[in-house]
Image (cartoon, grey):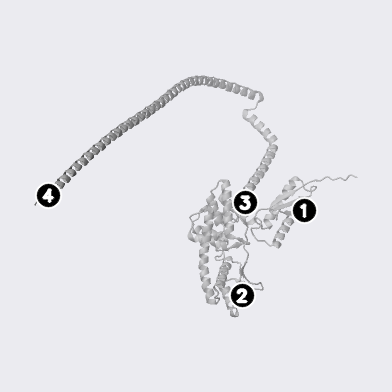
Amino acid sequence: MMDILFPILLVIVGAVVGFASSFIMNNMKVSNATKEAEKIINNAKKEADKAKRDALLEQKEEAHKQKMDLEKEIREKKSELKESENRLLQREANIDKRDEMYQKREAILDEREEKISERQEEILNEKGKVEDIKKEQLELLEKISSFSKEKARECIMEKVRESMSHEISEYIKERENEAKLEADKKARELVVGSMQRYAADIANDQTVTVVNLPNDEMKGRIIGREGRNIRTIEAITGVDLIIDDTPEAVVLSSFDPLRREIARVTLESLIKDGRIHPTRIEELYDKVCKDMKQKTIELGQTAIFDLGLTKFDPELIETIGKLHFRTSFGQNALQHSIEVAHLSGLIAGELGENITLAKRAGLLHDIGKAIDHEIEGSHVDIGVDIAKKYHENETVINAIASHHGDTQATSVISIIVAIADALSASRPGARNDSLENYIKRLSQLEEAGNEIDGVEKTYAVQAGRELRVIVKPEEVDDLGAHKIAREVKEKIESTMKYPGTIKITVVRETRAQEEAK
């Protein structure tokens, strides 16, 4: 029994001792943890106090800094206000001085005005006395000379008129000659300046067009069996096809550039397509005609856009584009019209006229040429009808009607258009002219001068733009030289047709020659 109780007691004693040890250890840990927590709390409080003090210190420093900045800004504002106040005071003082000066000046002017009024009264009184004295003297002179004032004036004026009539005539003649020279010089400068400012390329349209072929075999295909293809092309296009020995080329001949262009495009399309037979030719021809109408409209729109013009009827735009396919002595009608429009605008600008209206009149001056092959009548009459149809300005209508001198010009712009038209047509290279016609015209010019009595020799120079007439000095005097110049001018105007103007210069000189031996 004791053997069993003793181990039990040992177990109980060990359990009590373990429990006590565990309790003591737990108490010690709790005590240490409490102390550590108190230490951490204390440290945290110290850190918080320190952070609070640092924050307060920073706030005080920031507040102090802001206070200093504010005081500085206030001082600067006070300084600026003081300067402004000083300036205002200075300005006020200046205004007071100026006011005082003006008051003094006004007083001086009032005093001067009073003196001037008094002086005017004295002058009027003196003038009245002088008039009375003059009247008395004239009455005395009339009694002495037995001539009235009016009769004496008539006698004096008659003598002056007789003595001065010759001098007046010479003076008027000199002034007239100077005015003519100055007018010619100004007009020449104006025209030359306009031509220089508008420097357009010279391009002539020919009556033939060459179409290149890929090979000579293509010529046979274009001709077709028994010539049916070439006959079809010539029949529907109205253009002659010349197929000669020239390798790989076909020549299209026609005086109508529109037909020639349609034929060229049609033939080139047939060559690319490869199917050349009458039915295909007609199909392509119809298609090209439609495309050409659109191209005509685009050409008209481009011309109007380049000139800076607006408000044209669509049908009139197409008519303008048709000018591209018309020629005059080889000169493209549309290019000529555009050139005339540019020149008209430049000249109108120099003269202070309406530039836009001048350009419009210049562009439309030959509009009748676009359809003169379709309607009977001159291109001038047709152009006037077209302008009236589309309600163009009266100035434009008159410019169209008068640019060849058929109608009297009623405005400066009409005269400008006529001048620009002559410039464009007469400048070298603008139009084709055969050598034979050129030589014939020069011969006619020289004959016009040689046929007049007293002329020794006549020379046409500057491509027929100037005629120099050498007269015999022993038979013709200076006045006679002027007379010969006018006779030559009248003879040329009545017997010849020519573009532009011809300058006539009569030269009279006397040479004294001796030979020393």
- The residue type indicated by label 4 comes to Phe
In three-dimensional space, the C-alpha distance between marks 1 and 2, rounded to whole angstroms, equals 58 Å
Quadrant, the C terminus: top right
Q: Which residue is mark 3?
A: 195
Q: Nearer the viewer, mark 2 or mark 3?
A: 2
State whether residue 385 appears in this view.
Answer: no
Sequence-first tag of 2 and 3: 3
- The residue type indicated by label 2 comes to Lys
Q: Which residue is mark 4?
A: 6
CB under 8 Å between discs 4 and 1: no
Sequence-first tag of 4 and 3: 4
- Expressed as whole percent of the image width and height from the top left, the position of residue 233 reads 57, 74
- The residue type indicated by label 3 comes to Met
Q: Nearer the viewer, mark 1 or mark 2?
A: 2
Side of 24 relative to 454 (left or right): left
Q: Nearer the viewer, residue 270 or 98?
A: 270
Q: Which residue is mark 2?
A: 219
Categorize mark 2 by other alpha carbons within 10 Å: few (<14), some (14-19), many (20+).
some
Sequence-first tag of 4 and 1: 4
Sequence-first tag of 3 and 1: 3
User: Seen from this angle, which residue lies furthest left?
Assistant: 1
Q: Which residue is mark 1?
A: 457
Residue 102 bears which disc, if any?
none
In three-dimensional space, the C-alpha distance between marks 2 and 4, rounded to whole angstroms, equals 145 Å
Question: Would you identify the image quadrant in which residue 365 lies?
Answer: bottom right
Sequence-first tag of 1 and 2: 2
Side of 329 relative to 392 (left or right): right
In three-dimensional space, the C-alpha distance between marks 3 and 1, rounded to whole angstroms, equals 33 Å
Q: Nearer the viewer, mark 4 or mark 1?
A: 4
Q: Nearer the viewer, residue 4 or 443?
A: 4
In three-dimensional space, the C-alpha distance between marks 4 and 3, rounded to whole angstroms, equals 148 Å
